[in-house]
Amino acid sequence: MDYKTLPVDKWDENHVQCWLESTGIKKEYVEKLHAEEVTGPALMELDDSFLKGIGMKGGQIHMLIRKRNELLQLQEKAQQGKNSSSKAPDRTEARTEPVSSRDAPAQDKPSRDHRAAASSKKQRRSSQLKQGDDEVLELSNCRPFKSQDTYFKYVKDRVLAPESGVSDLIAPCHEYKSFAIAAELNKNQLKSKFACEVIRFASACMNIRTNGTIHFGIMDSVEDKGYKHGQIVGIKVKERECYVDALDHIEKCFQENKQEIARKCIHPPVFVEVISKDSQDQRFVVEVDIEPTSSLVKNSFFEVYLPKYNEESQKVALTKEKAIYQRLGAKSEPVKPNNLATFIQSIQDRDAQRERAELSSTEVHTEASQNLGRKLAILLNDGKSYMDDSLRYILVTNRCEKDNLTCINFLMRLNIFCVFDFDEHSNVSGLYSKYKEHHAVRSYFLQDFSNESKTGNPPSQKHLCLFDQTSWVFCNGRSDFLGDEKPCDENTWIRTKKKYLKKAITRICDEILPKRSFIVLFLLLSPVQKPLVDTFQEFYTEMNGTEYIVCIAESKENYGKWANLAQASCSIETLEQCSIVGMKLSHVDATIQAMLPSTAQPRHLPVSTRGLCTLPSLEEEKLFSLEILCVDQCDDIKLDLLTEKEIQEIEQNFYKGRKIIWENFWLAEKRRCGEIIEREACKDASKLLDDILRGSGLNYSVAKLKVYHHPGSGGSTIARQVLWKRRKDLRCAVIKTSYSPATVCEHALAFRDYDEKEISHCLPVLLLIEDYDEDYLEELRNELMDAVATRKINSPRPYFILMCCRRSNDPERLCKASPLDTVAVTHKLTDSEKSLFRTKLEKLKQKDVKPEFILTFVLMCEEFNETYVRDFVGHILLDIDRSSRDTCLMRYVALLNFYVPNSYISLSHCEAFLGLGAYAERKLRAYDFKSHLSEQVRMIFIELRESTTYISSVRIIHCLVAKEILHQLSGNEPQSQLAMTLLQEKPLFENRFGREEFIKFIRDLFIRRDKRSRGDATDTLFSPFIEHVCKAEDCEKAIAILKAAYELLGKDPFFAQQLARLHYKNEKFEDAEHWAGVAKSRMPNDSYILDTEGQVYRKWFSFTVDKMTQEDTPQSIIQKIGIALKAMKCFRAAQQAAKAEYDSMNNAGYFGEVEVGCRLLRFLSTLDVFHRNPQGEYSELVKYLITDYVPKDIEKPWANLHSRLKGLRQNLYNALEWISEDLSYFQTDKNQEKDEEDERDEKEEQIYNPRKWLKRQSEVYAKFFISTSLMGDSNSALETQLMRRMNIYKSGGGNVTNILSFLTDKKEARSAEKLENILSFYTENPLRDRLEDNDLINYILCHITLSCLAPGSAKLVSVQTLRELSARFFKAKRPFPASAHFLLTLLYWPDEALDKEPNPHKDEILNSALQTLKRLYDIKKKDVPTRKKRIYTPFFLGKGYGLAKIVHKNKIDKLISGSLDEKRMKWLHGTVWNIAKIRDILKRVSGWTKDRDLFIRGHVKELPILPLHRDSVPPGNENVTFYLGFSFKGLVAFNIEVENNAAIRTQGI
């Protein structure tokens, strides 16, 4: 808008800029003032000091201040002129009042103050209307004639029909008066003015014999040009008595014999409230009804005086002469004298007309009853014969009387999302008390429901429970609640609780429920109060109208009050369109129940006695983490309501690619659609399930059946087929993985036990878990096993069978790794399957089903052949509009679907992107998102619906199709550009609904790496998308897009981490250093980010060393060493951070420090200053690193490095020791047998065979700290001992893991020789010559290892000697490593040769060692899932004595035939214990169970034993036998069996 039309105080900086340019101020100063955001108010306050501060010169300042002052003076004068001219409307109003004739009183003269106030209001109003004179205000109905309905309201600024004249005498004529000025006058003035208008209008109506209503507070365009004619404004009513008392003028103005008639014809004033959403002022329209019934006015005419107020005398006087008034058109005019006789003569005719009119109005007009049943059907389901069961309902209601509780059964069957209940007694005697008898409900108060943190869910599942159980929101407290939440009155509610209502409704509409997925149902069961209306207005605002709002009220009075208050938001007519009024509640109940798509028949579960039990909704909803499959699943569906088209759509949705639903199986069984193909894998899965149920494998309480499948190959269908087939003899359910394992476990147990007489004989429960996380599955399995263990019941069949269905790019590999419990589903079809698929395709084509409607099935028939998919997609995309919005959306979805498994985009995001409104009036609810898509996009997209929330989303029918779309639609645009464009799509990122899932998929696109352990085809260093950009385009593009994502997603530190990794991989080390610092600054205590920082410097150091030339200067050498030391410092920081992290075990910091340290040693050894001696040893370097010696050449240049380099040896030693102990605890070797086949790089060796990596790095470490000459020259015992220790390291010893790794060497003789060599470095008499703690541990372990390899070796000492040496481990009061306590369990385990006499002291040693091992293990493991860190058992108890009784695991492995995977399976399933050679070398010991705990007799006392599998321990108290293993966690029992023959019990010692 032009600044000239606005007052200065309304100007923004642009207006000011325009004005400044018109004044001639220099352009540079205009731009400076604009940059300083000088607005109109700021311009008014400008002074010299501010202007000098921005660099303005004196002359320019003087001119600007003068021009500004002139501007303000001009505007002030203009305002004064407007104020004086604004009095004109008052005069106009005065002239239009009927006071010009001698028969009417003079116009009252309001005070100047009143006129000024009214004038300014009119001035503002006029200016507003200038902006939109064509604005059409909404029409409103008048209050029904003679109605005393106190609930009737007018809405401010709506418009009544124009003033009217006489029609049929019964229909009232109307006259409007603004009364705005008069309402502010004193009492006498107000009374006289009001009486004057009423009496004139009344006498006119009475003389014409017509009914009429005069309205005060309604604008007449003649009176005020600033308003529309008939516009409702209202007046402030200070005292109602003034208006009532004003009618006392009747006695003064009417003739004495007519006064009583006038009193009866003129009804008392009615005060109708004017409501407004924006104003808090209470205003009214004052109305007076005139009813001249024929019995009162017959043969009479009415001549009246009119009262007027004399300002001089300040008294009310009457007009000098009487006048007879009549209605002429829409006005009340006096009868002219020359027409008086004619007027009086026609009175009889008018009386006759009045009598006829009254007679006809009293005839009974039977109102045609509305077809409310049909209206209800249209409102709830668009007129279809049945309702959409995917819709949810939000119920808003008030007090439900006891009689009505029998008529609301339909509510028990609706899918009610939440209830806003305004009945504080609802829990005692109202709706809530009945509803909770049928359904599981969560109750809230408004402030809790509006606050997502109080709904009882973690952030990741904040809306979750809301979908599984109805939320009951007590909007005005609860009378029976013991806390502080008590009911309150309307005004208090508006002040204290309305804000929470608004927040709750906004949360539902914006974040939880997608548009068009729910209906808000207002059920008015008792008199309505304002808060209920506020609820309507909030929903009306959030949903942009009433399209999804329905109101049901049996009482017309209740509805009337609600509608009259609600009309502030929308018109009465609109409300009536969405309301069912006057229909009995029992009729509503029956009508809705008849429209429901399913019957109310109960659901049933199988029971152990081969019968059935009923599963009520209440019990089912309590188990909300399970989707329960009943025996009679889907039988409640009214099959006759389903049309052939709908059945075909259900079938086609499945064959197009949507996940199979129970209705597909049900319709196939009912032969209403074709059979569902049963693939070979389904039969395999059924056979495996039968084997598990027969107990053919290990008797686990929780068994696993795994189904790995290619994406889109039908794995989920097969899993659900198995469930469907077994639903009648097993209890079946699908797990909702969004709930915690603890919750699922609790519900699974309750599900198993439900309605069973004896829980020991319940049916097994088959639980399907899909697309799960391995940690989640492991935690769930452990929870279930622990829960079963506490029951102490032994069952021949498993309690639970977890059918684990998961996508994998290599399902066959996973199946081979675990063939006894795994099924692989691939795209490849067997010959028999090909025949079935071809036959099915022909049948579908015979039904006129076009191939494009069953795309996934067609592609499956072709086994997803790449060429076929390419041609197929090319054909579909022919002639597609590449520039259209929906094609762009398809490319975005394809990008996500191809690179991010299980990704999708919510329908809400799609609609926001395509610019479709959230709600729109007059739109059909059957609004179809697909109608806005091109035909090609419609074929490619498949709409998914989440089974519990019914939230719709969109994805490409298959990831291979997504790949082809990306390729074929890219043209010359690279994928990085597509992703960059995606990041700039504000509608997608700003859409609040489903935002968390969308952001997660975007993060995964840029960050999630592929991992074979997750079923991906390969292990990748970066996300597949980033790797593609680097390979197909260039690294800079990948960096640019990661930077853009970093900025967009709130400067996520993990994006900064990826940027650091990407930079150092591409040898951009300065940039990598920057981004690692950025990530660290945002998450300074994250061990993984600190490790990345270390990797930056490690790679940098390696790069600079590899590029080193002879020309490198001393300064560049110092720089290289500094980089290496920085890396080691970062890795040590990562180590400390990892110790504080209880949910992960990040050991990368230790590995990183060792790798950098060893590389640094190699680098130092190449420098001229550390030349080798004639024997080839690095004596000069060793001397520098372990003594105070510093070569003169580097003394000063390396001044800042000496102390850190001299700490290098100890730092490396600490890291190597930590890694060694860590490897002693857990099973870490992923692939030991492939080492010789596969030469892996250093990093891969660290991952795949860390034991070998540790041995190699230990040798490198030792090589640079050995110097024979130094040993000879040294006078220090410490230095001599260090040299010996380094020689032990170099020979392959030095720590527990290195020593034990000799046992895995295929050449045992060579290993034995090396061990004997290592023992030669130790003192010949360790009892006399005391060894350090670590040296002693290694010395003892060398003997145990050597005895396993060469039992007859001359170097071996006796067990008794080793026991004596280990005495310090339990006698000394200082802490020892876990390996020391591990050795005590090996040495002090009862030995038939040594321990012939019982010795309780030895039990104390064993018990103390076991307790310490358990404590150290718990500290070590933290809260990491057991699956990730399985305990490693290196030794077993054999049949010998002395050291010969200790058998290493590798010896057992050599007796097991088969490949590595087959050996693992035999260990996993316990079949190793069936091998006779293994039974021959191991000793079976006896023990007993007590409350599922396992014990064994030591020397004298009982000792606790850890079972390998918790559920392998028999319940109750039993004698058992087992094989005994020794681990860093304690003693472990393998192959536990109940002892059947006590007479031949194997002794425990």
Image (spheres, helix red, strand yellow):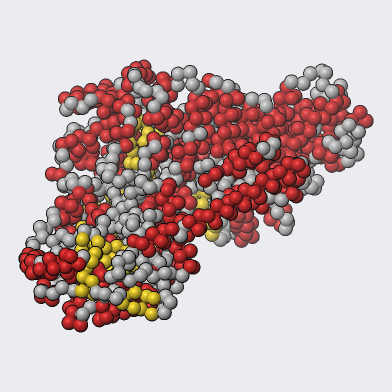
1063 over 166 or under it: above or below: above
- Give the farthest residue toward the right: 1192
Instruction: Kindly tell me whether residue 1120 is visible in this rendering.
Output: yes
Q: Residue at x 37, y 75 (%)?
A: 309
Relative image position of residue 1349 (x, y in whole percent): 62, 34
Going by the image, does 167 lie left or right of 1021? left
Q: Is 211 in front, or is 776?
A: 211
Q: How many labels does the image show?
A: 0
Going by the image, does 444 lie left or right of 1291? left
Going by the image, does 1418 lie left or right of 564? right
Q: Is 655 in front, or is 88?
A: 88
Relative image position of residue 1397 (x, y in whole percent): 60, 58
Instruction: Kindly tell me whether residue 1304 is visible in this rendering.
Output: no
165 over 377 or under it: above or below: below
56 over 812 or under it: above or below: below
Q: Which quarter of the picture shows residue 1498?
A: bottom right
Q: Which residue is drawn at 80% across and 30% down?
A: 1119
